[in-house]
Amino acid sequence: MTSRMSPATIKLTQRYKSDAELLARFNPDMQVVFCRDIEKCFFGEAPSISLVEQAYGRTAAMSWMEIQLNNLSEFAGCKGKLTTAQIAETAAMIVDGYPHFKLTEFMLFFQRFKRCEYGKFYGAVDPMTILQALTTFGEQRARAIEEREAAAEKERQEAAKRANDELRERYRDRVPDAFTPKAPLDFLQYRLLGYDSMSDEQLAMEIADLQSHKKTLPRGARQMLDYLRGAYDIKD
């Protein structure tokens, strides 16, 4: 059985030896604690509901969701509580409809619902109101993911620019007449042909050999660099 489990399910079952242990860790009383860190709710290491189902079975995933729904029903304080049948059907719809949501994301949803961020119940706890609110939460989740990815991309671009600026400075410091037609190596050659990794002594010897025409750049390397200049409109 274990040999057929994915690495993710094996890791989960090693962390939580039983579904009871998992349910205890992610019980409704922990909603406030987990939801203090919204970033972690969305992007932490909590398992998705589908992973819970894969690791412990359908019953475990359903039980966890039913516990959360029953807690919401009791919290609402309405006379009309969710019936056992309503809880079971709503739980099944959520587990099937949002398999990729983490347990902490659902807990964040239920916390926001309790804070009336998606409206409130009138007289009776309404499964359709819960499902409609979950759609809104899904949109919020998608925006949070987009914003995180945009921030990560911005950081990647800034890091790449910093690295390129540093490389340009090293080229300027190490190659005579850098960024001029007189330079024995242009910046693209310096960057792509391994010259930056050379020691100062090695580089000086290479430059001296190029300047005295004892060495020339390999024809294949020149052709490749010429192609890159044309394809990407590289000026230096």
Image (tube, rainbow, N blue to C red):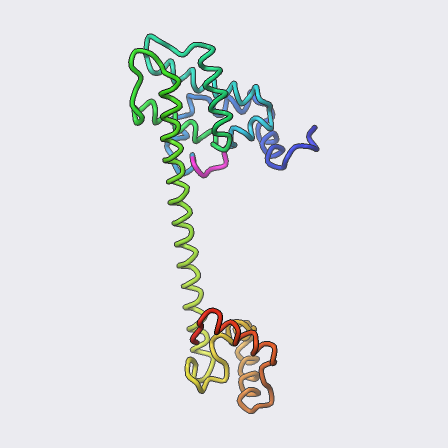
Q: Position of residue 203 (x, y in %)?
A: 54, 80
Q: Does residue 195 appear left or right of residue 7 in this picture?
A: left
Q: Position of residue 93 (x, y in %)?
A: 48, 22
Q: Residue at x 41, y 68 (%)?
A: 165
Quadrant housing residue 140: top left
Q: What secondary structure do most residues of the magenta stretch adopt?
A: loop
Q: Residue at x 61, y 77 (%)?
A: 220
Above or below residue 6? Residue 53 is: above
Residue, far front: 231
Question: 209 or 36: nearer the eye?
Answer: 209
Above or below residue 57? Residue 198 is: below
The stretch in magenta equals 42-46
Q: Quadrant of the C terminus?
A: bottom left
Quadrant housing residue 56: top right
Above or below residue 170? Residue 125 is: above
Q: Residue at x 34, y 27 (%)?
A: 112
Q: Position of residue 154 (x, y in %)?
A: 39, 54
Q: Does residue 124 appear left or right of residue 50 in this picture?
A: left
Residue, far top: 79
Q: Does residue 120 appear left or right of residue 131 in this picture?
A: left
Q: Position of residue 178 (x, y in %)?
A: 43, 81
Q: How many marks do you count on the picture?
A: 0
Quadrant housing residue 3: top right
Q: Quadrant of the N terminus?
A: top right
Q: Is residue 12 magenta?
A: no
